[in-house]
Image (spheres, rainbow, N blue to C red):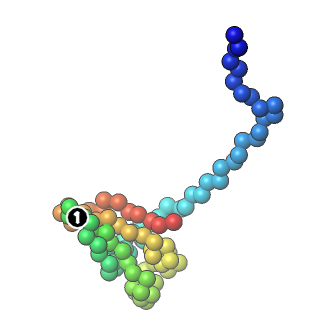
């Protein structure tokens, strides 16, 4: 009767190093600006709304003054807002 032996390669391969990408935390100023200046609202149902600032609105002098170099990052941020409770459910940022 043949005995079972697990397969082992004759040489050991070095482990691959996985590259990780960590984005810095989203500054509160960006979240505040999206809440204050949003001009796009999408109803998500159940009293929830997705809030965004359009690219056209981001060109306004008022927003550029408030955000400065963070203006481009605000273009990728959406906030899921609970209308009934008046609070943020989740902040989403596209990569």
In the image, taking residue 3 as reference, residue 52 lies left or right, namely left
In the image, taking residue 46 as reference, residue 4 lies left or right, namely right
Residue at x 57% of width, y 57% of height: 22
Residue 12: quadrant of the picture: top right
Q: Is residue 91 visible?
A: yes
Dot 1 surroundings within 10 Å: few (below 14), some, or many (20 or more)?
Answer: few
In the image, taking residue 46 as reference, residue 90 lies left or right, namely right
Foreground residue, 18 or 12? 12
Residue at x 48% of width, y 78% of height: 71
Residue at x 32% of width, y 78% of height: 40
Residue furthest top in the image: 1
Residue furthest left in the image: 84
Give the SS element for disc 1. strand
Q: Which residue is mark 1?
A: 45
Foreground residue, 55 or 23? 55
Q: Is residue 65 visible?
A: no
Residue 52: quadrant of the picture: bottom left
From the viewer's perspective, is residue 31 above or below residue 61?
Answer: above
Image coordinates of residue 49 in percent, x first then y, are 27, 68
Image coordinates of residue 64 in percent, x first then y, are 46, 84
Image coordinates of residue 45 in percent, x first then y, are 22, 64
Residue at x 42% of width, y 66% of height: 28
Residue furthest bottom in the image: 61
């Amino acid at each position: 009767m043949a005995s079972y032996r697990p397969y082992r390669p004759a040489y050991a391969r070095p482990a691959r190093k996985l590259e990780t990408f960590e984005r810095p935390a989203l500054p509160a100023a960006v979240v505040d600006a999206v809440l204050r200046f949003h001009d796009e609202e999408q109803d998500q149902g159940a009293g929830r709304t997705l809030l965004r600032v359009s690219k056209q609105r981001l060109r306004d002098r008022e927003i550029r003054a408030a955000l400065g170099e963070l203006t481009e990052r605000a273009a990728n941020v959406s906030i899921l807002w609970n209308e009934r409770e008046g609070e943020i459910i989740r902040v989403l940022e596209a990569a």
